[in-house]
């Protein structure tokens, strides 16, 4: 059984998700043996729904990996829209570029290679949607900067905020995740909930997704 949502419910939700395509399916299938930290298709569909709902034309992603979540996001963009996505690993960044090309969205995506801790200061806003899915220890240090880059009414979406349930003390008798990362995410959730410029709701989908809107 899933730690947060029972497996049967997750399978049911997956059966209803028809928003994927051949490229996304192929990336997900190949990753079954690689185990890279990609979002699940249901989270991908949520990202696309959110991007369309706010009319996102300019988006930022922290944690490109091999481009899977970026394809979900870029699929919501108009031809003149742009997704900036940051990846610290050059090899993964190149694989992401290849996957963006395969998906036919490479003209709407710019991959920035390097450490987001350094690159984020050089990015100019405003963005309509920001997806945070990189280094978990950077979630809290990046928060105020990300909020400043959002337009009023824009969305900050963060993955893995429930961390397999381990952010809840005692939820698991024998925690399996890195305690440092667990603490970092728990602290981030507290900061997010109390941030004066944000209104936040958390969806217990897969590993937990928080959705924050920037107040006017």
Image (cartoon, rainbow, N blue to C red):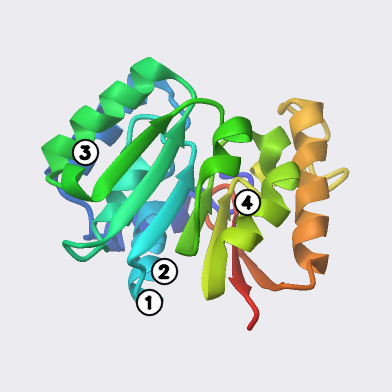
Circles 2 and 1: CB distance less than 8 Å?
yes
User: Could you classify mark 1 by the number of other residues whose Cα lies within 10 Å: few (under 14), some (14-19), or many (20 or more)?
Assistant: few
- Image x and y of residue 104, in percent: 12, 45
Give me the C-alpha separation between circle 4 and circle 2. 22 Å
User: Could you classify mark 4 by the number of other residues whose Cα lies within 10 Å: few (under 14), some (14-19), or many (20 or more)?
Assistant: some
Give the labeled residue for mark 3.
100
Front: mark 3 or 4: 3
Foreground of the two, 202 or 78: 78
- Image x and y of residue 153, in percent: 54, 78
Residue ID at (87%, 43%): 170
Name the quadrant containing residue 209.
bottom right
Give the labeled residue for mark 4.
4
> Is residue 73 left or right of 216 when viewed as pictured?
left
Circles 1 and 3: CB distance less than 8 Å?
no
| In the rendered image, the vertical position of residue 61 relative to residue 119, given as above or below | below
Circles 4 and 1: CB distance less than 8 Å?
no
Front: mark 3 or 2: 3
């Amino acid at each position: 059984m899933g730690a947060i949502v029972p497996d049967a419910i997750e399978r049911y939700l997956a059966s209803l998700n028809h928003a994927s395509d051949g490229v996304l399916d192929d990336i997900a299938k190949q990753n079954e043996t690689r185990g890279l930290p990609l979002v699940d298709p249901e989270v991908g569909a949520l990202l696309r729904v959110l991007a369309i709902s706010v009319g996102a034309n300019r988006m930022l992603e922290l944690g490109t990996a091999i481009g899977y979540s970026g394809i979900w996001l870029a699929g919501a963009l108009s031809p003149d829209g742009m997704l900036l996505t940051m990846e610290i690993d050059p090899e993964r960044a190149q694989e992401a570029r290849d996957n963006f090309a395969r998906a036919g969205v490479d003209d709407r995506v710019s991959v920035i290679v390097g450490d987001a801790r350094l690159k984020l200061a050089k990015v100019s806003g405003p963005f309509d949607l920001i997806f945070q899915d990189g280094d978990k220890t950077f979630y809290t240090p990046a928060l105020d900067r990300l909020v400043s880059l959002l337009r009023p009414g824009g969305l900050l979406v963060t993955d893995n905020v429930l961390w397999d349930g381990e952010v809840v003390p005692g939820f698991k008798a024998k925690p399996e995740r890195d305690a440092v990362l667990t603490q970092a995410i728990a602290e981030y959730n507290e900061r997010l909930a109390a941030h004066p410029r944000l209104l936040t709701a958390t969806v217990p989908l897969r590993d937990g997704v928080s959705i924050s809107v920037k107040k006017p």
